[in-house]
Image (cartoon, rainbow, N blue to C red):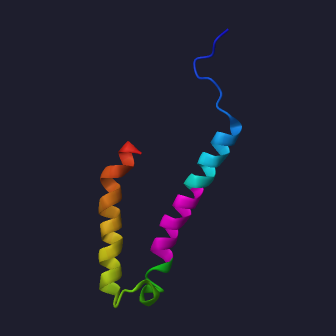
Amino acid sequence: MKTLFPVADPTHIVIFALITALCLLGDSMLYVVLPIRYGEAGLASLWEVGIVLAANRLVRLPINPSV
């Protein structure tokens, strides 16, 4: 009997989950760490941090449904 959705190799699922977790961690860290340590990122003031975070959000809004 054939299944409608064949089971994928578990190693592929684990690799995909780890990559996704790392990406989410990086995005979350951007919003937590950048306002605190903006000087080390090459930004001079908090308004520049706001522009960077707003640009990140504006790019992600149209991309999220396709991902």
Which quadrant of the figure contains the N terminus? top right
Residue 30 magenta: yes
Main SS of the magenta segment? helix
* 35, above or below 56, in the image: below
* 57, above or below 49, in the image: above
- Does residue 37 appear left or right of residue 44 in this picture? right
Q: Position of residue 66 (x, y in %)?
A: 37, 43
Q: Residue at x 42, y 90 (%)?
A: 39
Q: Residue furthest right?
A: 10
- Does residue 15 appear left or right of residue 46 in this picture? right
Q: Residue at x 58, y 54 (%)?
A: 19
Q: How many marks?
A: 0
Q: Residue at x 30, y 51 (%)?
A: 62
- Does residue 64 appear left or right of residue 51 in this picture? right
Q: Position of residue 50 (x, y in %)?
A: 32, 78
Q: Quadrant of residue 54?
A: bottom left
Q: Residue at x 35, y 86 (%)?
A: 46
Residue 44 magenta: no
Q: Position of residue 24 (x, y in %)?
A: 53, 60
Q: Quadrant of residue 25?
A: bottom right
Magenta segment, which residues? Answer: 21-32
Which quadrant of the figure contains the C terminus? top left
* 14, above or below 8, in the image: below
Q: Position of residue 2 (x, y in %)?
A: 64, 12
Q: Quadrant of residue 6?
A: top right
- Does residue 12 appear left or right of residue 48 in this picture? right
Q: Residue furthest top?
A: 1
